[in-house]
Amino acid sequence: MFSRILLSVSAIASLNMAVPVLAQAKPVELTSSVQLVQKTGEGAAAQQKLVVPTSVVPGDTLVFATGYHNSGGAPVKDFVIVNPVPASVLVTPESAAALEVSIDGGKNWGQLAALSVPVEGGQTRPAANTDITHIRWTVATLQPGETGAASYRATVR
């Protein structure tokens, strides 16, 4: 269990750098970040805030974000961002339902509810959030100077 926690922390550390994720070669600058969802209070007074994680444990919820900025002088059309999902986390069901995902390493894409996983005997089963390997966002048009972000929530395994 200790090695799993260390793996999670090293995965987070590597994603907190301002490095591009997989994306098309365009004049778009990308930054990646990971934040920990920190809960305070109980019941109706409960609140959540995002903080930079110093350590994580199984069950913690993280927000993975990719910021983008068109630093070029022309609009960028159909800009695609692809993020591999670290093996040490599980995309939350709420995030999974709203995203375009891959369950086969980025070969095929779709809404999770429309995907299936082959099982023994030539059968298939509905894909689950545990099967997600990659997440993809497409920005239809990114104007010069425009900035935005794409994010998802995941739970540390």
Image (cartoon, rainbow, N blue to C red):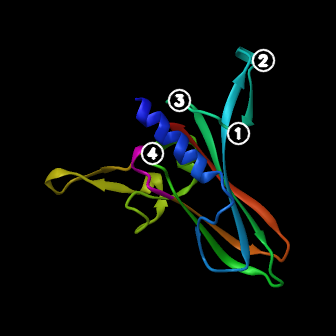
Left or right placement of residue 144 versus residue 89 in this view? right
Occupied quadrant, residue 37: top right
Q: Is residue 148 above or below residue 78?
A: above
Could you tell me which residue is drawn at 48 percent across and 37 percent down? 6
Marks 2,1: beta carbons within 8 A: no
What percent of the width, then of the height, locates residue 21?
Answer: 59, 64
Amino acid type indicated by mark 4? Asn
Cα separation, mark 4 vs mark 3, equals 20 Å
Query: Which of marks 2 and 4 precedes in the sequence?
Result: 2
Q: Is residue 107 magenta?
A: no
Cα separation, mark 1 vs mark 4, equals 25 Å
Which residue is disc 3 drawn over? Answer: 57
Cα separation, mark 1 vs mark 3, equals 14 Å
Which residue is disc 1 drawn over? Answer: 52
Q: Which secondary structure, mark 4?
A: helix
| Residues shaded magenta | 130-134
The front one of 61 and 20 is 20
Which residue is disc 4 drawn over? Answer: 129
Query: Which of marks 3 and 1 precedes in the sequence?
Result: 1
Could you tell me which residue is drawn at 71 percent across and 15 percent down? 43
Circle number at residue 45: 2
Left or right placement of residue 17 versus residue 128 in this view? right
What percent of the width, then of the height, locates residue 115?
Answer: 40, 57
Q: Which residue of the protein is positioned furthest toward the bottom in this rendering?
A: 74
Numbered disc in front, either 2 or 3: 3
Q: Quadrant of the C terminus?
A: top left
Q: Is residue 132 magenta?
A: yes
